[in-house]
Image (spheres, rainbow, N blue to C red):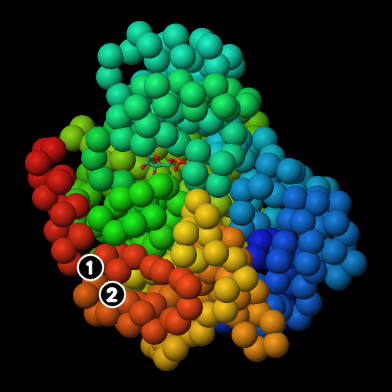
Amino acid sequence: MTMKILVVGGGGREHAIAMALSRNSDVDLYAVMAQQNPGIAKLCRKFSIGKETDVAAVTRFAQQNSLDYAIIGPEAPLEAGVVDSLEKAGIPCVGPTRAAARLETDKAFCREMMEAHGIAGCPRYRAFHAAEDAISFLKGYPGDLAIKPVGLTGGKGVRIVGEHVDRKGAEEYIRSLQGGVVLEERLIGEEFTLQAFSDGKNIIPMPLVQDHKRAYEGDKGPNTGGMGSYSLQDHTLPFVTGSDRKRALDIMQSAVAAMEDAGTPYRGILYGQFMNTRDGPMVIEFNARFGDPEAMNVLSLLETDFLSIMERIVEGTLGNLPVQFSRKATVCKYIVPEGYPESPVTGEPLAIGPYEPAILHYANVEEREGTLYTRSSRTLAFVGLGDTLPLAERIAETAASNVRGRVRHRRDIGTQELLERRISHMRELR
Ligand code: AMP
Ligand code: GLY
């Protein structure tokens, strides 16, 4: 029986979701996206271009087309309440309600929830409404701190005192923020991403991934939405032990249990971003959706039919579903406009060269009369799959270097050299 599925969102992550769903020939895809993603458009029976946070318009599109399920890619529509609205209209969703999405959309809520339920991995923190209170706390705090705006910032809002800003810059930054701030201890270690499917009670983990936030090679420059990511054939990372991974998964399971206790069950994709410290994994943040780029790593490996996972999430019967991921390494490299993220060159033509066997994901790119043009955010991404990391890296790197135009990418993502640096950093810490 044909199932009509709505994908909300138009980036690389949503293209990966659309590809995973369309491997099932019973799926008819529909999309709502702010700007036309050429890859998603090609896979869809029908799409609508419009604001993803326009909850009424998204719901109307779903109703008019009698859609069966929806999956929400980005966080902004979750915060706007798109799941609440679609479910009220009888369309079950993979994605949390507005209340459950607070795990991501309100960083003070997230920390308070962890503290109240005694969930491990919560750094020491303080939440402030008034900038002046935060600044006087900062003045009296001897160590380094992470400054986090309470609300959504597209992954670009955190400033580490002593790394991104000095103390003077930190005060100015806090003063510039609206809507509250969380200050927390600076964690030292190696970051990793653990994503899981959640039906409100049960969670099923996906392979571990490491993302690269910084704009330039060697982890230099400003934070971005993520420049690329890799995962290994055994689905773990060499600087994360079995017990680290178990602790991270237990933390995620506890967060899901806490949300259920609070009467706001968490259904959808739960993304845990962890700092693996000397004392084990600590929670940097939870996200209420797949990571972008991390979705492209894990969904390229997913062997189980994605539609049946969606159905189990919605029914609350994920518990004993065997979910399989292919035992390969993946490397994802984003192509971004020159000047991204601070002053990206937009409207510049680019040409994709030979790229196979890499998998091409379109993101924030315009296609006009057969030519691609940059927009202001990440342009497109290539994923290489291989039996080992170096093989996967070669595939992604070759595809990325064959792109012509005023764009760039990070050549170091997925290289053995970078992996060795992560491993030796962890060895120094432990
Ligand atoms: P977020 O927007 O929460 O994903 O944070 C963006 C980046 O800031 C993370 O990927 C980390 O590199 C860094 N970060 C956030 N919180 C902390 C912390 N408490 N200690 C150290 N680094 C952090
Ligand atoms: N890759 C980080 C994020 O999706 O938030």
Instruction: Give the side of residue 69 with respect to residue 94, left or right.
Output: right
Compare residues 317 and 367 and report the one nearer the observer: 367
Q: Is residue 351 left or right of residue 297?
A: right
Above or below — where is 399 with respect to 67?
below
**Who's the residue at 50% across and 19% down the image?**
127
- Under circle 2, the secondary element is helix
Q: Splitting the image into 4 quarters, where does residue 91 fall?
A: bottom right
At label 1, the amino acid type is Thr
> Label 2, on which residue?
393
Asked if the residue at tag 2 contacts the one at tag 1, i.e. Cβ–Cβ closer than 8 Å, the answer is: yes
- Residue at image coords 40%, 47%: 222
The label shown at residue 217 is none
Quadrant hosting residue 101: top right
> Which of the four quarters of the rendered structure image does ligand 1 lie in?
top left
**In the figure, is residue 284 to the left or right of 337?**
left
- Residue visible at 39% across and 63% down? 228
Q: State the CA–CA distance, disc 1 to disc 2.
A: 6 Å
Q: Answer few, some or many: residues within 10 Å of disc 2's Cα (few below 14, many 20 plus, some between 14 and 19).
A: many
Dividing the image into 4 quarters, which one contains the N terminus? bottom right
Q: Can you give x and y, in whole percent of width and height, for residue 13 in the image?
A: 54, 64
Measured as percent of width and height from the top left, residue 194 is found at: 39, 51
Q: Circle 1 sits on which residue?
A: 415
Label 2 residue near ligand 2, CB within 8 Å = no
Amino acid type at image mark 2: Glu
Q: How busy is the neighbourhood of tag 1: few (under 14 within 10 Å), some, or many (20 plus)?
A: some
On the rendered image, what quadrant is the C terminus found in?
Answer: top left
Instruction: Identify the residue at image location x=31%, y=40%.
Output: 275
The answer to whether residue 90 is seen in the rendering is: no
